[in-house]
Amino acid sequence: MGQVNVAATGVDVAGGSAEAPQERTELRVPAAPILLALKGIAKAYGPVSALAGIDLKVFDGQIVTILGPSGSGKTTLLKVVAGFETPDKGDVELAGRVITNATPASRGIGMVFQNYALFPHMRVAENIAFPLQMRRLARSEIRDRVGRALSLVGLAGYEDRYPRQLSGGQQQRVALARAIVFEPPLLLLDEPFGALDRKLREYMQLEVKRLQRRLGITALFVTHDQEEALVLSDRIAVMNGGSIEQIGSPADVYGRPANRFVADFIGESNIYRGKVAASSPEALTVTLASGQTFVARGASPRPIGAEVGLVLRPQAPTRLTDRDGADNVAAGCIEDVVYVGDAIKYAIRLDGGGQMVVRWPFDRNQTPLNVGETLRIGWAGDLLHVVDWT
Amino acid sequence: MGERRAKAVERAPRRIPVLRGEHGPVLVGLLPLIFLGFLFLLPVARLLMLSVEGGTLVHFQKALFGELYVRVFYDTFKIAITVTLLSLLLAYPVAYVLSTASPQWALIGFVFLMLPFWTSILVRTYAWMILLGRNGVLNQILMGLGLVSEPVHLLYNVPGVLIGMVHVLLPYMVFPIYSAMLRVDRDLLLAAEGLGGSSLSVFWRVFLPLTLPGVIAGTALVFILSLGFYITPALLGGGRVIMIAVLIEQQVRQFLEWGFASALSIILLSFALLAFFVLNRTAWRKTA
């Protein structure tokens, strides 16, 4: 949990700074208070367990993403926080207050729904005014705040439109404005960009991040899009089957996945199954079923014979000439070539058996390799990440 | 609506090759049109012409200014409006329960709603006469429980007519409201709640406005049907509650006053069309 306190400063946590000793960090910047705490949240629908004991802390001012495949329980978790579902077990605390059984209205949390849930019979201004009217604010105050919220999301002048007269991106901004206009301490976003096309999605992601920083709002975000999670989050909680598999900064979950599921789900990776052949504090030697042996550095020691997974990101290996050496070397022949814009992906059939996908930047001056060509590749031991196989 | 119709038109030619092409829809519509034209519109037009036979408006004068007949129109409207309001009050909660019930319970609810709907209106009205009569089931229960000391008059008066009409017309109110409720996105209610709305304000500000098109459609149906209701007021009113349709029947059958009956029919038809037009306009404005 060391990285948690660092991340709590609200500064983007790169992989390096997360390594800083905990004490020093706390001395420099006092940890932000915990805004939202989930303690042992469990929820079942009949015999089906949707959430199996979720613990999660969200610090003030952060964007935390709950990332997981559909059916992993992430939306249920968001509903528990919003108050639309009551957990069977566990507690929800908002700013130190237990709100597990509080009504959604009394929680004062802002939420952006997947389909925006704008009231179709109200104009844009009425939609945004709704939460303020529910709080019985004065008419003039409501008008001021609605105006400010609209200009904040860049929709000044759209007050009198109906939601159906707006594009998807504009509807989303209205939903966002409506969710922040009453200055909630916490903003929930349920896959808010799912319905937008890629370009607009990327733009809105940055827009939301900018808004969040500017308003100092804390946001809990649900998505199944790992790229989105990496772009947006201070911290990511990877969910699967109703449990959190890993919580950490984007750099953490990408660079040091806690287990095979996280390694597979976040980013592309080559995962190989093997047994530990030798273990020392410096290096772990792993033999695959095919007989190939790879060396991983920086992994925690494991008993000889333990089943492990070796995780190698496609951009990690480099092409070797005949004379070059590396911690790990493999040879193979190209099976498939895919252009992905600024890079080329090669699927390589390894001589010892098995396949490896590598991704290298596209170089204008070099002719790309062709299907059937043979090559040697190598990578350093610290680029090979070890996870337990189970 | 227009879009849906356009789609249906698009699809129809694919199924029946003969009806392919732009004349397909016309061909489909032609047969019922001929049928309705000869067997309904023509006779109705003939009947309506009777009101001005001899080039005189005397029948209309009598209907619109004769104190007795104005009274009947007034009563008819009063009963129609009361029936509509009572149906609305009963139907809205029923529709809500049906729209939120699990599929099995919704089915059971619908069977109970449809069963009377499929039963002959005459049978139902006679059933009410048995229930509401002086020595009817209801009075026996009320007296047995000691709630009243002498039989309550529920038959051959306005309350009896209201009970019977509401019973017959209730499904017409429930169905449009039910379908409007089904169309309401549940996330909107959650959103309203999450934004600080109490149950009451979620209902008034979000749920009710979104179901209003169904309410208007049901209101239009029930109101227009009640304006021209005949059997139930005739039987349960026992000749003491006179609505327009009853009056028209009397004029034709007892007094052979075809011209006057025709004038009354035209006035009734105009009111029905006017009500339809007004409510339709409101519905359009709400949904457009």
Image (spheres, coloured by chain):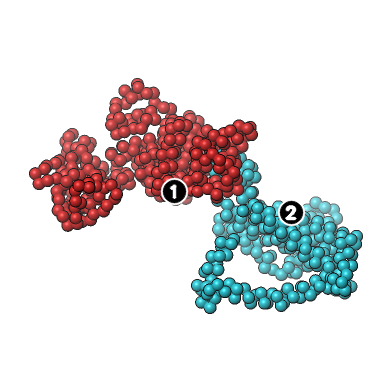
Chain colours: A red, B cyan
- Depth check, front residue: A47 or B85: B85
Which label was assigned to residue B76? none
Residue located at (30% from left, 30% from top): A17
Q: Position of residue B48 (x, y in %)?
A: 80, 71
Q: Position of residue B233 (x, y in %)?
A: 80, 64
Query: 10 Å neighbourhood of mark 1: few (<14), some, or many (≥20)?
Result: some
Q: Is residue A308 left or right of residue A249?
A: left
Among the 4 quarters of the image, the one containing residue B54: bottom right
Q: Amino acid at mark 2?
A: Leu
Among the 4 quarters of the image, the one containing residue A137: top right
Among the 4 quarters of the image, the one containing residue B160: bottom right
Q: Is residue B116 visible?
A: yes
The image quadrant where one finds the N terminus of chain B is bottom right
Please identify the residue farthest to the right as the structure is shown.
Answer: B67
Q: Is residue B128 left or right of residue B183?
A: right
Q: Position of residue A324 (x, y in %)?
A: 11, 43
